[in-house]
Image (spheres, coloured by chain):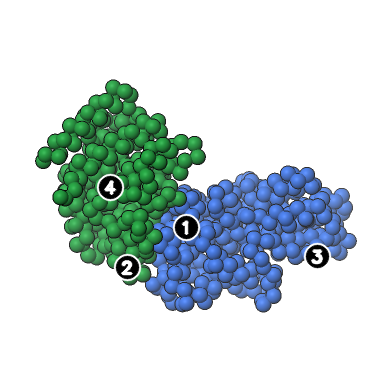
Amino acid sequence: MNKNPNRAAICDVLMEQAAADKDIVVLCSDSRGSASLAPFAKKFPEQFVEVGIAEQNLVGIAAGLAKCGKKSFAASPACFLSTRSYEQAKVDVAYSDTNVKLIGISGGISYGALGMSHHSAQDIAAMSAIPNMRVYLPSDRHQTRKLTESLLKDSKPAYVRVGRNPVEDIYEEGNVPFVMNKATVLAEGKDVAIIACGEMVKPAKDAAELLEKEGIKATVLDMYCVKPIDREAVVNAAKKCGLVITVEEHSPYGGLGAAVSQIVAAEGLGRVINLSLPDDPVITGTSKEVFDYYKLNAEGIAACACENLRKEL
Amino acid sequence: MTENYKVLSYELRKQVVDMILEGNGGHIGGDMSVIDILITLYFRQMNISPVNQDDPDRDYLIMSKGHCVEALYVVLAKKEFFPIEKVMQEFSRFGSPFIGHPNNKLPGIEMNSGSLGHGLPVSIGIALANRMDGRKNRVYVIMGDGELAEGSVWEGAMAAAMYKLDNLCAVVDRNRLQISGGTEEVMAHDDLKERFRSFGWHVIEVEQGNDSDALNVAFEEAKRIKGRPAVIIADTVKGFGSSVMENQVSWHHHVPNDEEYAQIMKDFEERKEAARHE
């Protein structure tokens, strides 16, 4: 099992490029450890800004740096970054169009037992609703690396959510299909389309394997780009399958499921079932315990597919 | 002959009032209190013009009290960033880029603002970037006194001192009024000097905050301070320039009627003439 969390992959890329690119600046709000960015701070102190526990300051300062040509990466727990500094994300980053990449670490329910204050089950909805803000939830460390490399090449605002714990690889090192703002097709079947993002991609992929044993062919999309969503991929999957299941570590409102539903409904292509966290404070537990409880696992996704295809697993 | 900045201030005040009349809205009281700060910065202090507006060595201004954008527009027009006629015709109109708060898609405006408490942290980022790049330029941020109730201002106050940003100068337009009443009744901070000092800032108080010469002396002092940021607390008068508006809370956001307009223009003209002979 991979021991490198996605957040560390971001640090790796920034470390590789910071020596040659002095405009890369990393900002933390007493979060360098939890963001896996302590090695960056140590190696590149001149390109690192600590703001203390002050998320509004974090994002405002990041925007000011970007105004002067810096490539700002502001990393803070997603729960705080997507709420406490929401207005700075809206005004200083998106509206002012500054080159700030907001890195929401320990996203979703990564902080499990710490409770709702530390969960960010609303971040996709919040960030997606801001004009000129992109939203990315990479699935594994290899895709996170590709995404980070790609983000370093553009100068537009973006919000990236990564989880706290290492997750199993979806892709193989050196063989990571990645096109910016295009979903990655992990399986192609005609019976059901499973569209997932972030940590839900792995159970989506596993669910397809379970369904395969039952003779059900699933299409699986890794929709790491929740905004701008890959509309074409959604349309193709819905056209092919008719039944679409979305899976996300997020509230039922305003996330991946909502975005996919809008497209499928507008095109009149089929049904969308949204598997998500509930509209409630999430039950206490580790990520795995919580996902299992809410059936956000391979078995739950497969069962949902079967039920909706009126078949028994 | 040296420019008479008082005369200029009344000419520009007239434009502000006309713009607010044309656009049927605007933060007239704050425009009148802040305009001398803007004039002093743009005409006597800052290295900024349409020619060097993209030069990384330019001086930066962030208008954190973005609602007083009308005063900023007339000063930028006077600096020839855009024609004053265009602002007058388009301010607040359908589809116009001349919005009621700063819009950085316009020349001369660095950042969008409007929500209070954003400017200081943004300015800190700009000051840090310039220092990282070894530049000698300066960064200015103008905040209102009511704005200082925003917690993010004090997050910024901490960071600016921690990073010893002596290339950063904040200005507080201390006009003592906000939309609901006197600042000391809404959220008191009459110990402003002590507050900034306790955060590690160099504090300069300007008793005549609508006097460009007095402000200019303060900006010169701020430039000499090393190792910490400076804040100029400018004791201004809200609605400065006409007895109709001065120190009147109801003029925070107000469009003058015909009678008021006539009196305001008369007052401006009289004060301008007096300034011409000072």
Label located before the other in sequence (3 or 1): 1
Q: Is residue B74 left or right of residue B216?
A: right
Q: Is residue A191 left or right of residue A149?
A: right
Residue tagged 2: B135
Marker disc for residue B201: none
Q: Outermost residue, left direction?
A: B278
Earlier sequence position, callout 4 versus callout 2: 4
Secondary structure under badge 3?
helix
- The chain shown in blue is which? A
Residue lying at 78% horizontally and 64% vertically, measured from the top left: A187
Q: Position of residue B102 (x, y in %)?
A: 40, 46
Residue drawn at x 64%, y 68% as measured from the top left: A143
Q: Of helix, strand and loop, which one carries label 4? A: helix
Determine the chain carrying the residue at label 3: A
Q: Label 2's element? A: loop
Distance, label 4 to label 1, CA atoms, is 25 Å
Of badges 4 and 1, nearer the viewer stands: 4
Camera-side residue: A203 or B244?
B244
Tag 4–tag 1 contact (CB < 8 Å): no
10 Å neighbourhood of mark 3: few (<14), some, or many (≥20)?
A: some
Q: Which of the 4 quarters of the picture holds residue A65? A: bottom left
Q: Give the crowd class for mark 1: few <14, some 14-19, many >=20 residues within 10 Å.
A: many
The colour assigned to chain B within the rendered structure: green
Say yes or no: labels 4 and 1 on the same chain.
Answer: no
Kindly identify which numbered label has been placed on residue B38. 4
Q: Callout 2, which amino acid? A: Arg
**Residue B201 at what x, y percent from top left?**
24, 57
Q: Residue at x 31, y 37 (%)?
A: B15
